[in-house]
Amino acid sequence: VTAIKDYMEENAGVSNAFTSLTELRLHGRIIWENLDKLIDVLSDQLQNSLFTPECIELERLVILDELRRSQDNRPGPAFVWQTLFNQSVSNRTLGPADNIKSFSREQMLDWLGQRLSAKNCTIAISGKISDPSSILRLLEQKFNFLPTHDVSHLAEPTYHPTNAHDSSRKTRNVNLFIAIPKRFKMDDSMFFERTCERRFKLYLEKELYEEVRQKHGLVYDISVAAVGHN
């Protein structure tokens, strides 16, 4: 990871990735004359990632911790959005802890192989593109490893629970959610108010971290909420 970051910085670019409930996204930004280097890095990550057992176990623990924290904090945001802003929310789920603990490296690679297909992949480029034809040829060259099987008929994988990490919810935790109204629109007259809001949020984060997290080991969340049209 560090080598990739250094390489991208040397070529005036950045790259990253994230997952959501519906997608895996690899993305990046770079100066236009080095676009081929960004394409090369992303295609290489998609095709040649090692998925070492050590990294899988490390990420498994991270995901289980995310699940625990999402369970601890779930009532906070739901209460704020439903009670204060009269908006419904859907709670993001990472699946049962037993599922996260259970999968093997072989199961993960099999799952990825079944779903990794050109029919299930979208590539988008925006910004300065001097020669679209050459970029399309480069994309065809770098991503021709993608198979073309259909993924719409695939069923969910079968899990076999095993013990990897205790993610039981800690009853000591309390749910604290602080919402600070945020304006959508920004103009010069609002600059001072927006600066004050931002400073106040940073101040609360620091004070809450020291008091709630450091002294008592409890979980909390703080957020700036965008409300209304003014």
Image (cartoon, grey):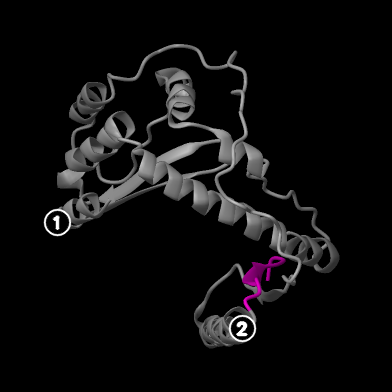
Q: Is residue 146 above or below residue 229?
A: above
* Residue 129 in picture, x, y percent from top left: 24, 40
Q: Is residue 197 left or right of residue 125?
A: right
Q: Is residue 113 left or right of residue 11?
A: right
Frontmost residue, 169 versus 224: 169
Frontmost residue, 139 versus 15: 15
Within 10 angstroms of label 1, few (less than 14), some, or many (20 or more) residues?
few
* Residue 19 in picture, x, y percent from top left: 50, 43
Asked if residue 100 lies in the magenta stretch, the reply is no
Residue 181 is tagged as: none
Residue 94 in which image quadrant: top right
Q: Nearer the viewer, mark 2 or mark 1?
A: 2
Residue at 66% across / 74% down in the picture?
A: 218
Q: Is residue 106 left or right of residue 166?
A: left
User: Over which residues does the magenta segment extend?
Assistant: 217-230
Q: Secondary structure at mark 2?
A: helix
Which residue is the site of mark 1? 10
Q: Is residue 134 above or below residue 100?
A: above
Q: Secondary structure at mark 1?
A: helix
The quarter of the picture where the C terminus appears is: bottom right
Q: Is residue 213 above or below residue 22?
A: below
Query: Disc 2 vs disc 1: Cβ atoms closer than 8 Å?
Result: no
Which residue is the site of mark 2? 208
Residue 85 in which image quadrant: bottom right
Frontmost residue, 198 versus 166: 166
Q: Amino acid at mark 1?
A: Glu
| Residue 228 is at least partly visible in this image | yes
